[in-house]
Amino acid sequence: MNFVTNGVGTVFTEKNMKSIKWNEQLTKSACPPLSRPWIPTAPLSESRPSCIFTVMTYNVLSSSYATPTMYGYCPREYLDWQVRGQNVMSEIYQYNNDIICLQEVEMEQFDYFFLPNLQNMGYEGVFVPKSRASTMSEPKRRLVDGCAIFWKINKFSLETSKLVEYKALALQGRADSSDMMNRVWTRDNIGLLAVLKTTAAAWTHGPPVDPNNIEQLVVVANTHLHWDPKFPDVKTIQSMMLTKEIISMVENVRRSFNCHERILKFSDVKVLLCGDFNSLMDSGVFQFLSTGQLPLSHPEFQGFNYINAIVNMMGGECCGKITHPLNLSSACSPQIMPYTNYTYGFKAMIDYIFYSSSNLMCLGVYGPIPQEWFDMFSVVGCPHPFVPSDHFPVIAAFQLTA
């Protein structure tokens, strides 16, 4: 459940169920959609050793939100986790990606469903729940959703991981801003960082000439930003908080390796930033992440008193702008993938894979399910018997060279 137009989601009454002409028999007779097309975006370089890997970001839709009230166009049996969970896992198995970032994973599901199933497929993973889990007792806290990162152990090993708790960061950086406390601190969204190292088996076209280059560092960030379109200021500040934490992590691992007689520059560390950002491409979130800067006068701050808090958090300003040095690009665009969230009330691209374009090459991405399938079977929104979430996974391939 995500970016919706009325602030709470589309509630399906008898009246509007009739208005969308939902036809259970038509839904049950639908055929699976055609395969999503693979769209190359850059040529593969075979001139030197390289690590080629694929990345998925996917909001799997928490069971707490997958209700007939929210998704009345989907047959009830396909909203039940016993069915839908298997369909989500089939979607993940189908693409067999090297790094997987999932959002809206419930704690119970991570421990007893996602982790054991993916371990059987050669993955390991880490998970953090949203902040409210720390205030709840069992068994309710086990149903809180959060973010998970998985990686293929034949290509990557885990160096370290870290929870990014926006609520706690808002408290630290409030700088006497009541708006920071009233609007940002009250949201329990989180991010998760994992520092991965490439293994010797990850390299093709021979190993790197210098054995020290076999273990390349990749900082993987996964997040789920606040959903409400009435709070673009909160989303923008959360994205700044996450960026600040990524920068700190890059510096920490760089210094750690330098202490072991291997000199790394900031630009040597690769960065992947994945997630459900609940933000369109014309948003402050996308502008800040993809261009590396955002004016403090940006209209999405809505005139709230954030300037001192933001400047203190990000370590200063330059010419009325807040900047970051990560040099991020989006792997996908609406021209390739018109929508990643497809519901009755809202269809748009709000999920992204950002990558450090100075040291990673994006080789290609998957495009959308062909529109003809939605039209042929009158699919007004997802979940659907053949589409287990209201989101589609965003998938890209990258090349890292030594």
Image (cartoon, rainbow, N blue to C red):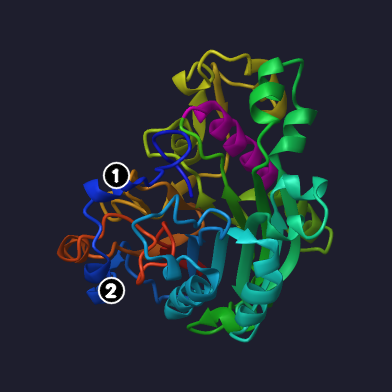
Q: Which mark is residue 28?
A: 2
Q: Which mark is residue 16?
A: 1
First to last magenta residue range: 230-248
Element assignment for label 1: helix
Q: Residue furthest front?
A: 14
Rounded to the nearest whole Å, what is the CA distance between mark 1 and mark 2?
21 Å
x, y percent for residue 262: 75, 63
Residue type highlighted by circle 1: Asn
Closer to the camera: disc 1 or disc 2?
A: 1
Classify residue 210 as left or right of residue 397: right
Residue at left offset 26%, top offset 72%: 33
Residue at left offset 56%, top offset 58%: 62
Crowding at dot 2, Cα within 10 Å, few <14 / some 14-19 / many 20+, comes out as few
The quarter in which the C terminus is drawn is bottom right
Residue at left offset 58%, top offset 30%: 234
Reply yes or no: does residue 244 show up in magenta: yes
Element assignment for label 2: helix
Residue type highlighted by circle 2: Lys
Dominant SS type (magenta): helix
